[in-house]
Image: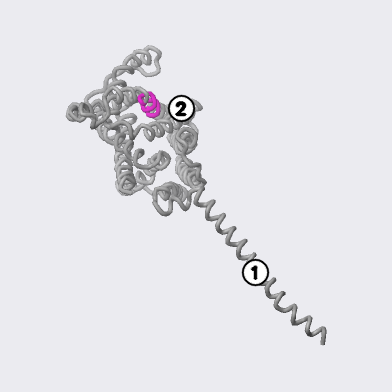
Amino acid sequence: MMQTVKGFILLGLVVILWVGSSTLIQTILEDTNFNKPFFLTYFSTSLFSLYFIDIFRRRQDIRNEVLPGLRFTAIKAAQFCPLWFGANYLYNLSLTLTSIASSTILSSTSGIFTLLLSIFLIKASPDVFKFLAVLVSFGGTVCIAMSDWNTQSETALGDILALSGAVVYALYCIFISKVGESVYLPHLFAFVGAINFVCLMPLFAVLNYTGVETFKFPDGEVLGFLFLNGLFGTVLSDVLWAFSVKFLNPALSTLGITLTIPLSMVVDAIIDDMSYSVVYIFGAIFIVFGFFIMAMFEHPTIGPKISNKGLKERFCKKYSDDVDFENQILIKKHEKTEETTPCDDTQKSL
């Protein structure tokens, strides 16, 4: 139970950090005209290397096998790095090629993909209420995104990238769920940062040569924004989020991230005095309600009751009780008939 509580606390902290991070990303991409999604993702991911400080600090624990070995951790990081970078880069790139509404809708399908893939890859239970939770949350995201729909800025390529990012993000969640017990997550991300820094550096030349993203080193102001975003929106928040996946289930952690939408609405309403339509508000309510349904599976009493197994047992018990009740009525009728029959025979003989 304590792990579940820790998971929810960490998820709440991540939502707060990501709301702040999204504001910084918007400032970097729009206000400073530094529209470089690959550089943004590369820089943020490379900052994971700061966790090597912890590896150095805890080297004695690693030698004594209190923590997993560095070779094993590096291998898992090499497997994980393409998933992490791919999910984040595809999302950042989609923002430059399609509308924010389209990107938001398609990225939110990661909850559906996470649930489906977790059923096939880690044999999670295909509970009906989990699908209901994901669909309710997705419906809320659609309501909000449709309120901001702008067809002039969307392209098919951007939509495909956003959808692809959602699939890769789902695989990323499941990977963390599977290896979370066998590695120390801060050390895993340290190697992710180092591998990203070394292996992906040549792509700057490729992207610059092909014209996909011309290389430009940021000025001091942008570099400061990048560092703040990377430190809090990536280095800290992603490790906290990985721990939440470890303590909770992947689908719940994925749905939890959609809570950034209603929280952003609250922040905008307080700071910028923004008002929202009824559809927008109902969308936020659906998102929170979808998360609430999924969160019920972590409750030690309610979770088993709303699972497929629990629902089946309750249905079978109710059906059995109904059958028993009908049988008891028939037995009583039969006994009553047997009791009255001798009396009738006596009356006839008289």
Residue type beneath disc 1:
Ile
Residue at (41, 33) in percent of width and height = 174
Query: Measured from the top left, where is residue 191 in percent x and y?
Result: 28, 24
Mark 1: few/some/many CA within 10 Å (<14, 14-19, 20+): few
User: Which quadrant would residue 183 be assigned to in this image?
Assistant: top left
Mark 2: few/some/many CA within 10 Å (<14, 14-19, 20+): many
To which residue does mark 2 refer? 161
Is any atom of residue 49 visible in this view?
A: yes
Residue 86 inside the magenta-drawn segment: yes
Main SS class of the magenta portion in the image: helix
Of badges 1 and 2, the one in the foreground is 1
Q: The C terminus lies in which quarter of the figure? A: bottom right
Residue 72 inside the magenta-drawn segment: no
User: Which quadrant would residue 29 be assigned to in this image?
Assistant: top left
Q: Which residues are magenta?
A: 80-88
Q: Identify the mark nearer the N-term, 1 or 2.
A: 2
To which residue does mark 1 refer? 329
Which element carries disc 2, helix, strand or loop?
helix
Task: Say whether residue 74 is left or right of residue 92.
Answer: left
Residue type beneath disc 2:
Leu
Please, is residue 281 above or below residue 153 in the view? below
